[in-house]
Every structure is written in C-alpha cells, then in structure tokens.
DNA sequence: ACCCTACACTCAGAT
DNA sequence: AAATAGCGCG
DNA sequence: ATCTGAGTGTAGCGCGCTATT
C-alpha cells in the first residue's frame, strides 16, 4: 500500500504563477507511472515531447487544454506569466501540438469572431444574401450556412484579420489522460485549484499502486466511444446516426456495460421525442433485456439483468402505440419477479392499465395509500418553511432536512466502510466517494465492514461513533454527508430521539439499494424529546403544497415507514387567501 | 457525478 | 443601453 | 376530481469581464 497523498499535498501553491502547469505535470507523471501500459507509443511520445518543451510553451499548452474548445485567437491567449505568446506558441506549432491557421467551418468561425468582425469579414456574402446590416448573429449564421458550407482558413475567411487563429491538436489525448487519472470525464483540472483554495476537502485513502479505474486500453476506448456518442446526442445530432454507430456493449466489464445501457436509454428517449418509435423500442430492448439477444434467456422467475428504466419505458411506449397485448406479455413476467422496488412500483401502475385495455380482469386492488395525512391552511410562502414554522415549538423543534439527516447519519456511522481502501475504489486524491458506489456489488464487497459499523447501533456505541466522525471528518467530501445541512443541535436531537432500531432499519434499506434509496426522505423531522414513555420521540413530515404530489421514491419510503411502524405523515398545505393588495386608481 | 441529480412546479391527457 | 449568459480564473 | 407521464426550472465556489441582445 502506498498512501494517496492528501489533495492539499499534491496541488500546486497558487503563489506559483504557473501553478496550473505544476498540476498538469503532476498528472502526466502519475499517469505514466501508474497507467503507462495503457498508453500507446504516440501517447508516450507526446508526454516526452511536452516535457521537453520550453516551460513557457508548456504553460501555454496547458492554458489551452484547460479552456473550452480547441480553437483560440492568439489575441485571446494573453498571459502575463507566459509573456510573449508568439514565442511560446512557436515550439508548440513546430512540434505539431498546435495547428496554425486551421480550416474552420462556419460554425467555428462564428464562435471565434465577434459580430462586428463577422460583418466585416463576410460583408460581400451578407450583401449578396440581401441581409440587413443589423442582422443578429444567430440569424446571420442561419442565413449564411447554406452558402458557406466549405471550411476555410481564417486567412481566407478574413485576410485582414488583426491576429492569428490556432487549434490545439492534442485535446483528445489530454482528455484520455484526464480520464485515466480521474476515472471519469466529469472532473477536470479545476479540481486541483478548488482543493488548493480550500473549497473542497477530500478524505485521504490508502490505495494500492495498481488501484486504478481502467485495467485495459480497450476499456478506455469503450468509455471514450460512449462519451463521444453522448456528446453528439447532447449537441442535437439525430438519433438515427448515433444508433447506427452504437458499439457492442463490453461483455466482461459490468460498469461499462451499464454505461452502455444508460446511453441506450438516453438515445431511446430522444428517439421518442423525434417520433422514431421503432428505434426507441429497439434501444430500450437492447438496454432492458440485454441477454435476450443471445440464446440463453434466463429462466422464469429471474429478473433480467438490464436497465429497469429501459424496460418500463419500453412498456409505456408500447402502451402509447396501442400494443397492449405485447406489452402485457412482457410486463407480467416482470411483475412476477421485479428486479427492484422501483420496477414493482411502476408495474403496479402499468399492468392494471394494460389489463383494462384488453378487457381482462383487473388484478387485486392496490391497497390505499397507507400513510397518515394532514391538511393545513397557511399564509403563502415557501411551503416547507411554512409548515416547519407552524409546527415548531421549543419542546418539539422541527428541522427541514430532506435526505440530509438520515443519509448523513448513515454516512457518519459507516464512514470507515464507505472509505475503505478496496481495489478500484480510490485511485486519486480527489474522490468524493468510492468509484464503485453505485455498482451492483458495492455492498457485498464491504458487507463485513458495514455490519461492523451497524453493530454499534445494537449497544448504543453509535452515538459516540457518529459524534466522533462528525468532529474528525468535518468538511471532507462524502457522498452521504452534506456537512452544511447538519449542525450540532440537530445531530444531538437526532441521536437523542431516533431509536437505534429505527436507524438500523433505515440504514439497511439504504444498503439494499444505495442509489435508489438515498433520496425520497421526508422534508421535515420533528423531535419530541419530552414525549411520554412509549410514544415516539420524533416524526417525519413530507410537505406537499397545492399541485404537488408524492414522488415514487417518497412513496416507497413512506410505505417502508408505515410497515415498520415509524411515524411519518404527509402534510398537505392550502394557502390562506391573502387580502387583495389594492392598486390605487 | 454540471447532460447529472434531487426536488417542486406545470401542463396535457386519460378515466 | 441595461441586462444577461457564458466563460475564464484563482 | 384524480391519477399519470412528461417536461421545465433551480441549484450546484464566487467574481469579473465581455459579447450579445
Ligand atoms: Mn422536499
Ligand atoms: Mn415536499
């Protein structure tokens, strides 16, 4: 085991005017050391090439890497700590890391030039198209796009341009390095600065040298391929083209297979919006019943391995298309062995609708909502605060906590299990939580650790354990603890009033499906420390204003509270009529 | 986990 | 021409 | 009237600059 250095120990001091270069070089060294076998020759050569550049050139390269897009006007590359931009640029162009005067399509030209510049550069075209001189940028682009489809260089688009334009040629490789380092593409170079500024604090977790996100180059390639398709989807490209390019899911990597399914669902939803019902169904089928393409369908009574959301969307789309019998034939086996509470809940709504449409006997009537209901009429305002203030009493204080209290207590009690240094869970200094938090086997891999943490609920040790973590880990990023939403008095009231058995039940439920059950908890909690013995010393209150309704995850938590005999109510609010603010007239 | 997540709010359509 | 969205930045 | 699904909006570090409408 080598300890991962604390984030604060690896981030460059902001007193260094080229702090960002120090951070970038830290990543280069880290990747070469730990992921060297995943780099091809060209990538190794690129790293060596960068290291051999003059420092000003390296710094300018990193400035470009950290900025948005690949194209830059040289006038916009003006950095005091770098000095002469042209001098710093020359070695980058020489080495092929930056392309001088690249071909630009019209869209890029419009991004790079300001409107007055475009009017000068394209004066002839604007006149030829008969466009008014004051045409707005978007309208100008739309009007000229058909006539100017051919890419040209800036020196051709606008020979009188006062500066040059360059293109960073290594952005894709830098993204790949970033992906190897972070194990995702949502984190970027700013993680270093935010940590250095003290805006983010991370737990230090020991890791093995071989602990990393990717074991094989093909996995990186697969991640990047899915990511590029997702980007094109977000950019508005029609689904048809993307669907055709969808790669086969990676058979031996459950994480990447799940990312593949999520992309299928996203494509399916867009296909629905585009009116491509058949394509949407095919995508949902692919994500929802992934192994049904092979010749090994699972036996009856076993839920499919695919995405619940994909299956439900498939059924709903079939319903909308009038394919009720086909939908029911798929739905009934699922209802007999749902993969999760979410799926069961969705099918409880779907199957009766389908059966009714087909003239079949409705299934047994669903039980009525079994949570307590209150109704209040209050003066208008933010609805949760209105109810909190209405119910609040010195002897029965109310806190507006939503998910923060129960997930926070869980995160504090189970800190050691969550941040346990398992292989593949932590591999850089900027983890909010373990990388495998939402994977199928997250809990199974840590069962004993979680059991040990929860065992403290059985003899009251949990209180001191939670307080200790609250003190010692204060402010460290955690997927469960929102530090700002808790305070000492809330914590002490919760520890005094929440029975350990109730906490244990909630935490077990969280562990059954951390992703689905981490949300949906009621808005308010009221503590009654002085309640007579035998009466509950807390109650949970979900507030609903006019026009709001319970979400699925809220209903599932309420059903759970009811089944466990835990006090939870839904409080429906109506607004008091406000005396009309009269206008003088 | 800033194309994600969580929650409330809004609208439309079915019953 | 004031308001605003997006970006760059530490 | 009630239920349901789908879509939208807000918020995510905070500040200053700038391009655009
Ligand atoms: Mn709420
Ligand atoms: Mn609510």
Image (cartoon, coloured by chain):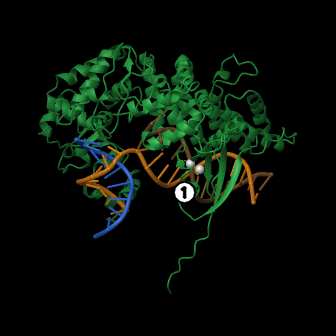
Chain colours: A green, B brown, C blue, D orange
All told, the count of numbered labels is: 1
Q: Looking at the rendering, which quadrant does residue A85 occupy?
A: top left
A112 to the left or right of D10: left
A78 to the left or right of A262: left
Specify few, some or many for label 1: CA neighbours under 10 Å numbering under 14, 14-19, or 20 or more. Answer: some
Q: Secondary structure at mark 1?
A: helix
Across and down, in percent, residue A569 comes to: 66, 47
Is residue A250 in sight in this rendering? no
Q: Nearer the viewer, residue A267 or B10?
A: B10
Q: Looking at the rendering, which quadrant does residue A46 occupy?
A: top left
Across and down, in percent, residue A438 comes to: 53, 28
Please state, as top left, top right, bottom left or bottom right, where the N terminus of chain A lies in the image. top left
Q: Which residue is mark 1?
A: A389
A241 to the left or right of A282: left
Is residue A94 in sight in this rendering? yes
Q: Nearer the viewer, residue A477 or C1?
A: A477
Across and down, in percent, residue A511 comes to: 58, 27
Q: Return the chain for callout 1.
A: A
Q: Looking at the rendering, which quadrant does residue A170 occupy?
A: top left
Q: Residue at x 57, y 44 (%)?
A: A529
Across and down, in percent, residue C8 comes to: 26, 44
Q: Residue at x 68, y 54 (%)?
A: A374
Up-down: is A174 above or below A236? Answer: above
Q: Nearer the viewer, residue A235 or A452?
A: A452
Label 1 lies in ligand 2 vicinity (Cβ under 8 Å): no
Q: Nearer the viewer, residue A253 or A199?
A: A199
């Amino acid at each position: 085991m080598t300890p991962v250095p604390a984030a604060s120990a690896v981030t460059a001091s902001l007193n260094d005017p080229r702090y960002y270069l120090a951070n970038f070089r830290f990543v280069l060294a880290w990747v070469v050391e730990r992921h060297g076998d995943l780099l091809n020759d060209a990538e190794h050569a690129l790293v060596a090439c960068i290291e051999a550049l003059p420092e000003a050139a390296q710094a300018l390269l990193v400035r470009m890497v950290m900025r948005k897009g690949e194209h830059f006007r040289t006038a916009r590359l003006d950095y005091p700590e770098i000095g002469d931009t042209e001098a710093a640029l020359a070695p980058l162009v020489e080495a092929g890391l930056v392309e001088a005067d690249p071909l630009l399509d019209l869209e890029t030209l419009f991004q790079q030039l300001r409107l007055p510049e475009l009017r000068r550069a394209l004066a002839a075209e604007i006149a030829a198209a008969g466009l008014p001189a004051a045409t707005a940028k978007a309208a100008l682009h739309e009007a000229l796009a058909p006539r100017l489809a051919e890419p040209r260089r800036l020196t051709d688009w606008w020979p009188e341009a006062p500066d040059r334009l360059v293109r960073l040629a290594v952005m894709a490789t830098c993204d790949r390095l970033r992906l190897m380092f972070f194990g995702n593409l949502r984190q970027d170079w700013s993680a270093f600065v935010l940590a250095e500024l003290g805006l983010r604090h991370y737990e230090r977790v020991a890791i093995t040298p071989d602990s990393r996100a990717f074991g094989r180059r093909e996995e990186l390639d697969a991640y990047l391929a899915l990511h590029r398709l997702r980007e094109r989807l977000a950019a508005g490209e029609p689904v048809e083209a993307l669907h055709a390019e969808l790669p086969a899911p990676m058979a031996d990597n459950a994480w990447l297979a799940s990312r593949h399914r999520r992309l299928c669902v996203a494509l399916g939803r867009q296909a629905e919006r585009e009116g491509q019902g058949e394509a949407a169904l095919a995508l949902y089928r692919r994500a929802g019943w992934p192994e049904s393409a092979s010749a090994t369908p699972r036996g009856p009574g076993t839920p499919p391995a695919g995405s619940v959301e994909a299956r439900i969307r498939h059924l709903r789309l079939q319903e909308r298309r009038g394919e009720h019998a086909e939908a029911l034939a798929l739905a009934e086996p699922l209802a007999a062995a749902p993969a999760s509470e979410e799926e069961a809940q969705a099918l409880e709504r779907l199957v009766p609708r389908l059966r009714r449409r087909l003239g079949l006997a409705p299934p047994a009537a669903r039980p009525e909502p079994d949570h307590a209901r209150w109704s209040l009429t209050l003066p208008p305002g933010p609805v949760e605060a209105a109810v909190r203030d209405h119910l609040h009493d010195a002897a029965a204080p109310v806190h507006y906590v939503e998910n923060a209290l129960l997930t926070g207590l869980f995160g504090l009690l189970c800190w050691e299990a969550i941040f346990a240094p398992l292989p593949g869970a932590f591999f850089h200094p900027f983890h909010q939580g373990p990388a495998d938090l939402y994977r199928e086997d997250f809990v199974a891999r840590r069962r004993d650790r979680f059991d040990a943490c929860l065992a403290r609920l059985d003899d009251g040790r949990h209180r001191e354990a939670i307080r200790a973590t609250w003190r010692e880990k204060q402010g460290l990023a955690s997927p469960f603890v929102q530090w700002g939403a808790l305070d000492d008095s809330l914590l002490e009231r919760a520890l005094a009033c929440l029975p350990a058995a109730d906490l244990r039940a909630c935490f077990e439920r969280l562990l059954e499906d951390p992703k689905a059950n981490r949300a949906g908890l009621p808005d308010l909690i009221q503590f009654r420390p002085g309640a007579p013995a035998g009466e509950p010393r807390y109650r949970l209150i979900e507030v609903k204003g006019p026009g709001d309704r319970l979400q699925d995850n809220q209903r599932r938590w309420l059903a759970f509270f009811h089944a466990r005999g835990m006090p939870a109510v839904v409080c429906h609010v109506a607004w008091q009529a406000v005396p009309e603010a009269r206008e003088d007239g």
